[in-house]
Image (spheres, rainbow, N blue to C red):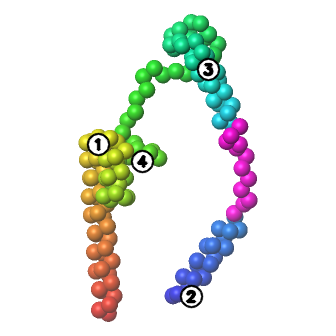
Amino acid sequence: MKKLITLLTFICFSFSLAFAEKYEETYDYDVTVEQDFAQLNKIEAYVNNNDVTLEELKLANGQLLKNIEINPIATFSMDELPLGVPPFWWGCVFSLLGVLLVFFISDNDSEAVKKAFLGCLVGGGASFLIYLLVAVIGLGAASV
């Protein structure tokens, strides 16, 4: 059985290496970021030099705002924390550490912390059930 598993592992690694290609970076981040922020830098310089508000900028020098979409109401939702991961999964995967991370990152948002704690309980319960299943299977195999 060990030989079969070793053979299958070797075959899987061989195929994965055979399909691997040389990675070439085709996206130059520095140039792209500079191009994307060039117009925003112009707007910032104009605002700093003339001390104007957004409405005054629209009236005085509207061409600076060409091709820029401005949303005056920027909202931030704690339904998703960094990396786009909801609080439940932070708690489920990282247990108590995840709950603490959510607590500190969300500035003590009680709803997010509750979701993370629920995830912690679900993850702990799932881990316990898996451990119990493995123990039962192990004891059954040992008695044979």
Nearer to us: label 3 or label 4: 3
The residue tagged 2 is 3
Which disc is residue 85 wearing?
A: 4
Q: Earlier in the sequence, mark 3 or mark 4?
A: 3
Would residue 17 be counted in the magenta stretch?
Answer: no
Q: CA distance from mark 2 to mark 1?
A: 53 Å
Q: Amino acid at mark 1?
A: Asn
The residue tagged 1 is 108
Q: Which residue is farthest top? A: 59
Q: Which residues are magenta?
A: 20-31
Q: Who is closer to the viewer here, 10 or 77? A: 77
Q: CA distance from mark 4 to mark 1?
A: 17 Å
Query: Does residue 98 appear to the left or right of 3 in the view shown?
Result: left
Q: Earlier in the sequence, mark 2 or mark 4?
A: 2
Q: CA distance from mark 2 to mark 4?
A: 40 Å
Which disc is residue 45 wearing?
A: 3
Q: Are marks 3 and 4 in contact (CB under 8 Å)?
A: no
Q: Amino acid at mark 4?
A: Val
Q: Are marks 2 and 3 in contact (CB under 8 Å)?
A: no
Question: Could you tell me which secondary element the residue under label 4 belongs to?
Answer: loop
Q: Dot 4: few (<14), some (14–19), or many (≥20) neighbours within 10 Å?
A: few
Question: Could you tell me which secondary element the residue under label 2 belongs to?
Answer: helix
Q: Are marks 1 and 3 in contact (CB under 8 Å)?
A: no
Q: Amino acid at mark 3?
A: Ala
Q: Dot 2: few (<14), some (14–19), or many (≥20) neighbours within 10 Å?
A: few
